[in-house]
Image (cartoon, helix red, strand yellow):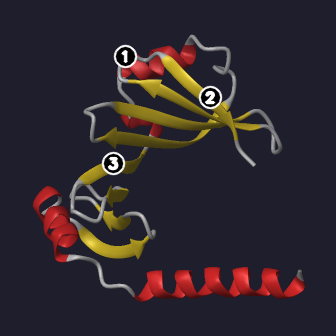
Amino acid sequence: MKRLLFVLVASLAMQMAVAQIRKIPSEVTNAFVAKYPEAKNVEWKDNVSNFSARFTSANSNKCEASFNGKGEWQSTEEILQETALPAEVKDGFSKSKYSGRKVTEVVKIEKNEGETQYRLLVKKNSVEKKYLYFNEGGKLVKESVTL
């Protein structure tokens, strides 16, 4: 049993090592440059099933874009200031049962299906934190507990 566990762990470690040294396909890098020509400080990460680029946008926001192996854009997350939230999302949050909580992070999530969401990390105290997902119209569509 110990031998089987060792073989599984070693195999996983080898896959991770190979994934980290695999070259980012030109289809992916070309698609990235076409979508984000003004990106700065680009750092690539191979996630085995997709590739992600962390970068600074033209407006100096931190972003992460994901692409599949064919170079097809999947999604982009952009860290925003709370003041940059659309009025509809601010209104939706203020009318939610979480309105009294402190917003500690705001992320705009654009998806390849054309959908845009805003993820707010809110906290009630140092232990109780939640992610709240709002659509562009300000409707709370999902919530999840953080660890």
Q: Which residue is mark 3?
A: 75
Please count the marks in the image. Answer: 3
Tag 1 residue:
137
Circle nearer the N terminus (2, 1): 1
Above or below, 134 against 47 in this view is: above
- Residue at 34 percent of width and 67 percent of height: 53
| Distance in Å between CA atoms under marks 2 and 3 | 19 Å
Judged from the image, the secondary structure of the residue bearing numbered disc 2 is strand
Q: Position of residue 1 (x, y in %)?
A: 89, 80
User: Furthest residue to the top?
Assistant: 95
Task: Identify the element where label 1 is drawn.
Answer: loop
- Residue 143 numbered tag: 2
> What's the CA distance linking mark 1 and mark 3?
19 Å
Relative to residue 63, is residue 8 drawn left or right?
A: right
Within 10 Å of disc 1 (Cα), the crowding (few <14, some 14-19, many 20+) is some
Q: Nearer the viewer, residue 87 or 42?
A: 42
